[in-house]
Image (cartoon, rainbow, N blue to C red):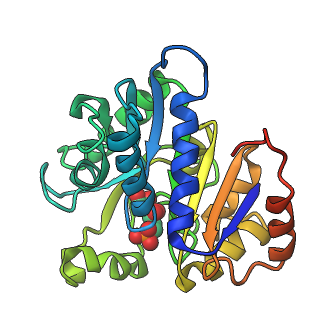
Amino acid sequence: MEVVLLPTPADCGQVVADAVQAALTGAAGPPAPAVIGLATGSSPLLAYRELVRRHREEGLSFAAVEAFLLDEYVGLPAGHPESYREVIRRELTDAVGIDPARVHGPDGSAPDPLAAATAYEERLRAAGPVAVQLLGIGANGHIGFNEPGSSLGSRTRVKTLTEQTRADNARFFGGDVDAVPRHVLTQGLGTILRAEHLVLVATGAAKAAPVAAAVEGPLTASVPASVLQLHPHVTVVVDEAAGSRLERAGHYRYVLEHKLADQGW
Ligand code: F6R
């Protein structure tokens, strides 16, 4: 696991954008269809803004991209402004020209959410491995909406949000906790682990404890993000505040400073 400790959230956005760009342009020659995995919430927003800038000003192409969302609320009607499909359209995919038909997410408005979960898992498998999967982390250590106690091998399924996560996300619903759905569809931890490169971004002091637990604590379903310790290629990108409880912070800085030129992310 590589931990990249950076001074500011904007610096984090640059590195996350670099990792996505590497997945899109890594191989020489015409771009092959790249499958990327997108997170919603606040954490990836600066990276998305930077990707939009690179698209507009530097010609970074998303033409051959298939995008898959991590999760979705159950019960919000299609087109609801806070459904993750709408959020990602607003924050990234429209602005970089990804055809909506190539943006996939679990169908939270389906009459049968259980079947929708299975269908999404199959769709992800058929699309082939996700080249780069972006992740945020919840205050309770969740990734996707895999709340504490989630099976480390889980697949896409329906989950019930904790009251803490609903309270945390109420800010997107005008502060009204009751408006935050109780249920979600989320890629499982086992599903997330199939991606080739996992990039977790966290900023701000509220993320310091879950980041430290995920990176330096024991592997446990009580901290779902600790499952990243099992994956061969993980980049954890944090600002000073989110990294403030990391015991090995000095070593992470030392490693970054002495990174070999062709090591990449
Ligand atoms: C969102 C998601 C969640 C968030 C996490 C952090 O698609 O899967 O795990 O990444 O709740 O949210 P923010 O970034 O808003 O602090």
Q: Residue 158 location in percent, x, y?
A: 38, 53
Camera-nearest residue between 199 and 175? 199
Q: Residue 192 location in percent, x, y?
A: 56, 45
Side of 35 where 62 appears, left or right: left
Quarter for ligand 1? bottom left
Q: Residue at x 31, y 49 (%)?
A: 92
Q: Is residue 117 visible?
A: no
* Residue at the top extreme, as displayed: 29
Q: Residue at x 63, y 41 (%)?
A: 197
Q: Is residue 3 visible?
A: yes
Q: Residue at x 46, y 42 (%)?
A: 37
Q: How many marks?
A: 0
Q: Residue at x 60, y 18 (%)?
A: 28
Q: Residue 155 location in percent, x, y?
A: 51, 43
Is 57 drawn above or below residue 166 in the view shown? above
Side of 4 where 55 appears, left or right: left
Is 160 drawn above or below residue 61 in the view shown? below
